[in-house]
Amino acid sequence: MAKAPVVKNQELTVTILDLTYEGMGVAKVDGFPLFIENALPGEEVQVHVLKVEKQYGFAKLVKLLKASPDRQVPVDKAYTQTGIAPLQHLAYPAQLKFKQHQIEELYQKQNLAVPVLPTLGMADPKGYRNKAQIPVRQVNGQATTGFFKRRSHDLVPLEDFYIQDPKIDAAVVVVRDLLRQYGLTGYDETKNTGLVRHIMVRRGYFSHEMMIVLVVTTWALPHQDDLVAGIQAALPEVTSIMLNLNDKRTNVIMGRKTRLLAGRSYLTDQLLGNTFQISPLSFYQVNPQQTEVLYTKAIEAAGLTGKETVIDAYSGIGTISLAMAKHAKHVYGVEIVPEAVADARQNARLNGIDNATFEVGKAEDLMQTWRDQQLPVDVLMVDPPRKGLAKEFIDAVGVLLPPKMIYVSCNPATLARDLKALAAFGYQATQTQPVDMFPQTTSIESVTALTLNAD
């Protein structure tokens, strides 16, 4: 085995060649890759080698000798430390190019000749998140909010989270101060003690309704009435205050049981003209402005004329199904989480949409059933989690063979893998449109249209 050309604690001057999917700079020493945080392509940097593995190493930027024209001054180093905004040092137009380039590179590795369009960005790429899950820890004898350092559980105290709706940031501070006022303790992971683990806040971008959920280790909440009254007095937008019980030693943020303290057990918001009821555990896209862009692109790519039958796999609470239903003959939504299906049915009723049917189950099983029933499917819409499409699902597509597929992806690596697998069944991806749902971060969303070759 060849010895690495660098050693730990070595000081080197290197040129940055590329960015990894995590946004780290890549330099090469005799072909050996070094990964360096806060370094950009084209930069010449002095680095200190931190760690050397067999195939690669990690180094720390010591001095910037030649800066990239795309470099900008970071807003706060805490946003890099915690991973809240790992691309904050990269100018926004360059962030958009980085995301387009990431997809192009992954396609090249899979030998896929699919055009990738320029990434659609935001006019104001900050303060966009409509949901926060903020850890509460006991620091210097009082409940403290912030965010964990990357790859650790060390809390960095923060009041401004930069990419979150500023009204949410303000609400977190109000709740934290009330916890302190009434002597309620933050959670201690090592001892498994303390009362409040997280403060979860959701805010409707269009409705301005706000939900606050305290994630606690026990239902017994001292000063409960005072706490509720304090929140309502300071935050008139709040329409829902809830307790969520998480009494397990786990990294999972929320437990399965939730109790209503005041107001309603959900908030409402609008998306492409539809109103949605969002409960504490519901999945709802965190950037509503860009979600409208993403869904509009998906509907355009589907080429709906009002005559089509659409299957929406991974339909959740029905956000994209109900948006497509306005342009299709009928939409069949499939989702494995029963609570989400109940929400989707309620959201269809709420919006007076009667051409959308929601079923609980695995999409691959229901697709087989619909095939047996000879349901004429024109478009298959998929919006899977980061792990992408299961092999069983892709095999089911090969049986159903809808003429058109729309793939909404949150992970370009699994997207490229799945497009390669779908090509074996005759599906040709026509183009991919990245949409920047998470500015300042390395996350990449996209819409890809696929058509079934007739031959």
Image (cartoon, helix red, strand yellow):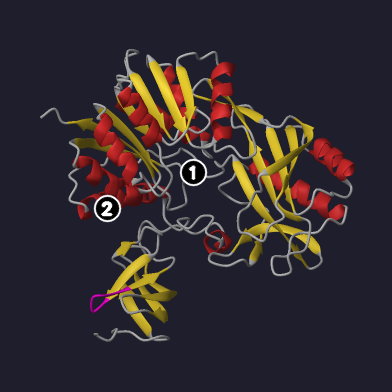
The disc placed on residue 367 is: none
Q: Residue at x 41, y 52 (%)?
A: 91
2 or 1: tag closer to the N-terminus: 2
Q: Is residue 254 left or right of residue 120?
A: right
Q: Is residue 306 left or right of residue 138?
A: left
Give x and y (percent) for residue 107.
24, 49
Name the foreground residue: 80 vs 70. 80
Q: Is residue 138 left or right of residue 33?
A: right
Above or below residue 293? Residue 115 is below
Above or below residue 176? Residue 44 is below
Outermost residue toward the left?
455
Find the magenta span and give its range: 29-33
Q: Is residue 305 left or right of residue 220?
A: left
Give the residue at mark 1: 125
Q: Quadrant of the C terminus?
A: top left
Q: Choose top left, top right, bottom left or bottom right for residue 141.
A: bottom right
Dot 2 lies on which element? helix
In 3D space, how far apart are the residues under numbered discs 2 and 1 (Cα atoms)? Answer: 25 Å
- The question of residue 448 being in magenta is answered with no
Circle 1 residues within 10 Å: few <14, some 14–19, many ≥20: some
Give x and y (percent) for residue 295.
41, 30
Identify the amino acid type marked 1.
Answer: Pro
Above or below residue 402? Residue 90 is below
Dot 1 lies on which element? loop
The disc placed on residue 106 is: 2
